[in-house]
Image (tube, helix red, strand yellow):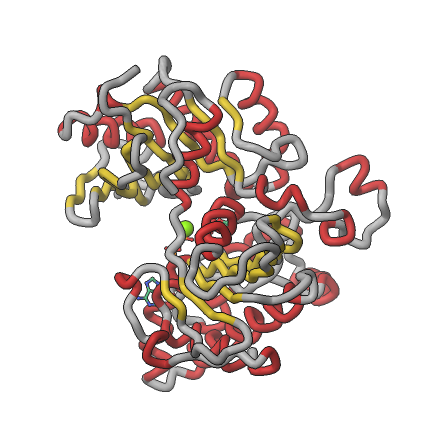
Amino acid sequence: MKENPVVLVINCGSSSVKFSVLDAMNGDDLLSGTADSIGSDNAFLEVNKNTRLALCEGTYDAALQAIAAELEKRHLMESVALIGHRIAHGGSLFSEAVLLDDEVVEKIREISPLAPLHNYANLNGVEAARHLFPSLPQVAVFDTAFHQTLTPEAYVYALPKRYLDELGVRRYGFHGTSHRYVSQQALSMPGMPHGDVGLIVAHLGNGASICAVQNGKSVDTSMGMTPLEGLIMGTRSGDVDFGALAYIAGKTGQSMTDIERMLNKESGLLGLSGLSADLRELEKAYHAGHEGARLAIHAFVHRIARHIGGHAASLKQLNAIVFTGGIGENSVLIRRLVLEHLRVFGVRVDETKNALPNSHGERIISQASSPVMAAVIPTNEEKMIALDAIRVSNAVPHVEFA
Ligand SMILES: Nc1ncnc2c1ncn2[C@@H]1O[C@H](COP(=O)(O)OP(=O)(O)O)[C@@H](O)[C@H]1O
Ligand SMILES: CC(=O)OP(=O)(O)O
Ligand SMILES: [Mg+2]
């Protein structure tokens, strides 16, 4: 057993590698950073938001090596006891975190066509880390796992059933690690009833999804077979009538691959505003009266409110609506507009509390008299991944630090 064990958490995206180092005994964040622009000549590693280093090569291996060098500099390398990886899609094969070995890697590869934009990047991170740290236990933690409690009525598409039976075409849901963390934390908020609580979690980041959680279990969620369904996102469209897409393909001669790229990379806030996928920029433009930014923000809010309303119908009762993710935690404007949109539920927002900065941490933003509580809970997917990694491996003593 290592003396001061730490867990290295890796979230490998299509052009970035996010990492965190957490104390395995108490979950404290010791070091974090992002290697960005992977796949280009300008790849760099940013550590603790203050140090920026150019990477000699824009590969996942080079990014992992640079991360290892940063750990070495801080005398943390010897303390790494295990590695936790975020894997977006676990299909129907994985309803729990699992220790990675060759067989598990192969199984993840088999289901990766279900989420090609996320899973192959995740696997690149796994391969680079297994190459660099061959003797350390490594654990895969799946975004989809928390949603394995969905019942068939919530996860089927109304397509000929053979596509479900033969190809596994169904809704899986994502951001499960965030929804799980936030819904657990919500239970200990002051004023939350005990027992069978019904919650809506709105995870609003670059990717965005809603989850209905009843009695600690995911019962409905807005993302589908891939992370494209549901809410409007930074560059993703969310829900669209397939008839509209068939019409566009017919008129423009675009292939399925072209259409899929357009829906994932050129749509959402970026596509509607014609300006940016970044909400900070859109908010500035919104206040300056930019037409595209106003349309994008109003459509974003409308879709969130509509999905919250729909998801509430999957609960036994609605006790609280909880915001999380980069936008959910930081955008006073989006929270205010969404909650105003939800007046049918009688939610009454407290403007002063809603205006508090995210440094206040977990906070209630509704008035005491509001029949439904509204709250902000900063997500911590890394802590959840570290806890899962500790639980399924025997590398360090099991702890409950969440
Ligand atoms: N202070 C802020 N005000 C408004 N939006 C913010 C703020 N800080 C971050 N965001 C937005 O959060 C989004 C990124 O969310 P995040 O959860 O970090 O993304 P990811 O899905 O990549 O983890 C971006 O649209 C960004 O503009
Ligand atoms: C699944 C998903 O949408 O992830 P992200 O928000 O990291 O893009
Ligand atoms: Mg995120």
Of 212 and 13, the residue lying toward us: 212
41 or 303: nearer the viewer: 303
| Quadrant of image for the C terminus | top left
Res. 381 image quadrant: top left
* Quadrant where the N terminus is found in the figure: top left
Q: Which percent across, then down, holds residue 45?
A: 24, 40
Residue 53 position in % (x across, y down): 17, 40
**Residue lying at the far bottom of the rendered structure:** 289
Looking at the image, residue 394 lies above or below residue 90: above
At 41% from the left and 31% from the top, the residue drawn is: 84
Relative to 239, is 293 on the left or the right? left
Asked if 132 appears above or below 38 in the picture, the reply is: above
Q: Which residue is pictured at 28% across the width and 63% down the height?
A: 360
Location of residue 359 by image quarter: bottom left
Q: Is residue 274 visible?
A: yes
Q: In this view, which residue lies farthest toward the front?
A: 194
Rendering coords of residue 202 (x, y %): 51, 61
Judge from the rendering whether residue 217 lies leftward or rightward of residue 288; answer left or right.
right
Identify which residue, 322 or 258, lies in the foreground: 322
**How many numbered discs, if any?**
0
Identify the residue shown where x is 48% and y is 25%. Answer: 392
Question: Where is residue 154 shown, x and y percent of the image?
Answer: 73, 53
Does the rendering let one see residue 251?
A: no
Q: Quadrant of residue 254?
A: bottom right
